[in-house]
Structure formats: C-alpha cells, structure tokens
C-alpha cells in the first residue's frame, strides 16, 4: 500500500490533470448546469443507524418529503480530510462518491448531511445547485461553518458561530406521539410485566470503550438486584455494537427476573421499550441512546463502560447539569426534568429559511 501522502497528492493531481479536465461532464460546472431546487430533502449519511436516525429526525420535523442517500468518499480521495476534499471541483469529488441513490439534478431544496463522511458531498451538491439548495449539517463538520447554511452541533463539540445551533445532545425523533404508537404492537408481549419496568439500552465495544461478556454479566447482576429489590422487571434491547456474547451473558444474569430481551428478529422494539419504561438505564458509550432516553423525560441512569472519551465525558457532564441523567449505582431514585429534544428548534430555523409556513410533522 502506498503511503497516505502519496494518495493525497495523487488525488489532487487527478483533479487537475489535463486528461481529467478534458473528460469533465456537466456535473463539473457549478452554474451553467444548475437546476431549480425541488421541494424535497436529501438526507446524506454513511448509512449507520445513529447517523441515519439524526437525519431522519430533522427531515421529518421540517415536514418535507425526503430521500435517503448513503454516501462515502472512496478511492484516493478518501485519504484526504474533508477540509481538503471540499476544494476539489464538485464533479471530480462526486466521481469518487458512490451513492445508494443517484446524485443528479434536479437538486433538492434541502440537504441534511450527518457526520464527517457526508461533509464534502454536501458542499459539492450545494455548489452544483448554484447555492439554491439549503445545506444543513448535523454535528461539527470540521470545516469552516460558512460552507453550510446552517449547522446543528452538540454542545460537547464546542462549535459556535452565527449559523450554528448548539444542541444539548444529538437531534432525535423521540416524542410522545411516536412512542405511544410504537407501544401498541408490543402491548400483549410486554404490558403484563411488573412495574417498575426498567428499560436497558445496550451499546458495545468501540475504539473508546469496552463492553465484554464478563462486563455484561456484572452489569446484568446489578440490574437484577435492582429489579428484585423493587419487584420490577427488565426490558433489554441491544444495539448493533452489542456482541452476541455480551447479550447472552447479561441474559443469563437476569434470568430469574421477569424480563424481555430482544433477540434481534422481527420489529425493533426500541421506541416501544422507551414507552413502557418507568426508568431507563443506558450504557454511556452512545450519545444518541442517552439523548433519546432523555427525550422521554423519564429518569435515565448511565452505566459507564471501561474506556474513555473526552468528548463523551463532556456530553455526560452537560446532561448531568441539565438534570437529565445520573450515574448507575444499582438503586432507583425518582426525579423529573424537561425532556431533552432540540430537534424542533433546528427544524423551525430550517422552515423559516425555506419559507415554509406550516409546522412539519414530528411523526
């Protein structure tokens, strides 16, 4: 494999080579081939569940039709950081961006991009639309904010600016209407379980954190003790990062407690379990899961995994200051706070910018 510097130089040379300039098609031109924006939104993400959920939450709150586009910069350009990718001619960049759906005119009225993989494609598409597309990025894009019309960045990212909305956590789609609807199909399966019902949202190992089978077993024992002491039940749902071994170990540890553990088949009960919960316990590795849990306004305990992330530590500190979370210690308390959900704040800004008079649906 060639050194990283070689790939970066090769990518820049490719963008400016005579051969490439001679074969540039209509996508290479910013203004000449711009088309009127369609009244729809494109959601650009790398396809992961967490990124997709945030993009969907914003688009649904705005209330315009949307299309999902899974994008990722490939080939030699993947070695370049976003702050360099954005300076390439849009058509050159998009030749290295495979997408689940075509990236071609007519351009959308709104782009909602989420995560660093979608930064350069979003900027390129805005340029190709002759800036008629309103581009919103979720999270810190790690490029100058002026490349986007608006940015929604969580407080722990530390980004500020005249076109930046600071959210307490991640944007999300948890709201009373959606949660109530999600409960209905699971009522006969879960509704009989004794209260207090303790919903447990499991993350998993990552670059920053570790959640092994022994870790899960110890966690399960603490959960079982808490449920037993309160004559309650446990409702458990793993995520894509939760290893089968960890799920199995935790399941064994809570086997003598009334419980429901999702096995990963059939409809995902995630929202339903938030609705059935009296209390929520969530592993601390996921900003999305902690924020979504806090979107219910119910007591949320965070179980801290082995590992460290300064960014997530800042997030936990902000949520603790807001009164939304407490550290999991194996006992139940009761407290209240205003549900954490800044999605509608972001959606209102977008609607006003687009001249949309009516409020979009949160469903």
Image: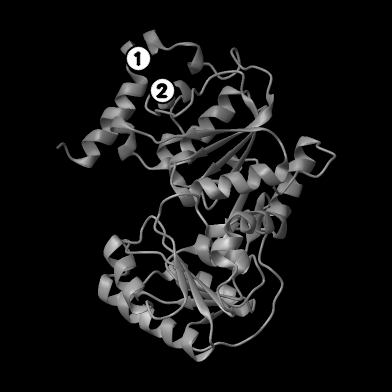
Residue 20 is marked as 1
Work out how far the residue at label 2 is from the one at label 1, CA to CA, in angstroms: 8 Å
Is residue 94 found left or right of 315 in the rendered image? Answer: left
Residue 41 higher or lower than 325, as above or below: above
Mark before the other along the chain sequence, 2 or 1: 1
Residue 92 is marked as 2
- Is residue 226 among what the camera can see? yes
Residue at 59% in and 44% down: 56
In this view, the residue in front, 184 or 5, is: 184
Quadrant in which the N terminus appears: top left
Secondary structure state at the residue bearing disc 2: helix
Is residue 181 found left or right of 28 in the rendered image? Answer: right
Residue at 36% in and 23% down: 15
Crowd class of label 1 (few under 14; some 14 to 19; many from 20; radius 10 Å): few
Q: Are the residues tagged 2 and 1 within 8 Å (C-beta)?
A: yes
Q: Position of residue 363 (x, y in %)?
A: 69, 47
- Is residue 307 among what the camera can see? no
Residue at 76% in and 36% down: 354
Q: Position of residue 301 (x, y in %)?
A: 52, 78
Determine which quarter of the picture holds residue 55: top right
Residue 181 higher or lower than 60, as above or below: below
Residue at 38% in and 8% down: 22
């Amino acid at each position: 494999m060639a050194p990283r510097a070689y790939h970066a130089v090769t990518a820049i040379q490719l963008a400016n080579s005579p051969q490439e300039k001679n074969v540039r098609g209509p996508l290479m031109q910013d203004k000449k081939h711009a088309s009127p924006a369609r009244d729809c939104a494109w959601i650009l993400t790398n396809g992961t569940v967490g990124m997709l959920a945030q993009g969907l939450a914003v688009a649904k709150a705005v209330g315009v039709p949307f299309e999902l586009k899974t994008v990722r910069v490939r080939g030699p350009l993947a070695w370049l950081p976003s702050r360099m990718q954005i300076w390439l001619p849009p058509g050159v960049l998009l030749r290295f961006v495979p997408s689940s759906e075509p990236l071609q005119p007519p351009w959308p009225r709104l782009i909602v991009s989420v995560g660093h993989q979608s930064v350069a494609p979003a900027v390129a598409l805005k340029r190709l639309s002759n800036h008629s597309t309103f581009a919103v990025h979720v999270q810190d894009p790690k490029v100058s904010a002026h490349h986007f019309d608006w940015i929604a960045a969580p407080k722990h990212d530390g980004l500020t600016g005249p076109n930046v909305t600071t959210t307490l956590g991640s944007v999300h789609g948890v709201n009373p209407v959606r949660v109530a609807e999600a409960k209905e199909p699971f009522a006969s399966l879960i509704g009989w379980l004794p209260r207090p019902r303790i919903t447990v949202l499991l993350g998993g190992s990552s670059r920053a954190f570790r959640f092994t089978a022994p870790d899960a077993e110890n966690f399960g024992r603490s959960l079982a003790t808490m449920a037993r002491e309160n004559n309650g039940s446990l409702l458990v749902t793993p995520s894509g990062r939760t290893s089968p071994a960890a799920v199995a170990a935790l399941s064994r540890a809570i086997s003598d407690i009334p419980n429901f553990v999702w096995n990963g088949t059939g409809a995902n009960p995630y929202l339903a379990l938030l609705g059935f919960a009296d209390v929520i316990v969530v592993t601390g590795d996921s900003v999305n899961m902690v924020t979504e849990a806090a979107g219910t306004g119910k007591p949320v305990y965070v179980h801290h995994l082995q590992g460290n992330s300064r960014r997530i530590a800042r997030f936990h500190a902000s949520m603790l200051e807001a009164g939304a979370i407490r550290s999991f210690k194996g006992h139940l308390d009761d407290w209240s706070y205003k549900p954490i959900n800044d999605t509608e704040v972001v959606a209102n800004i977008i609607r006003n910018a687009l001249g949309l008079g009516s409020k979009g649906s949160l469903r």
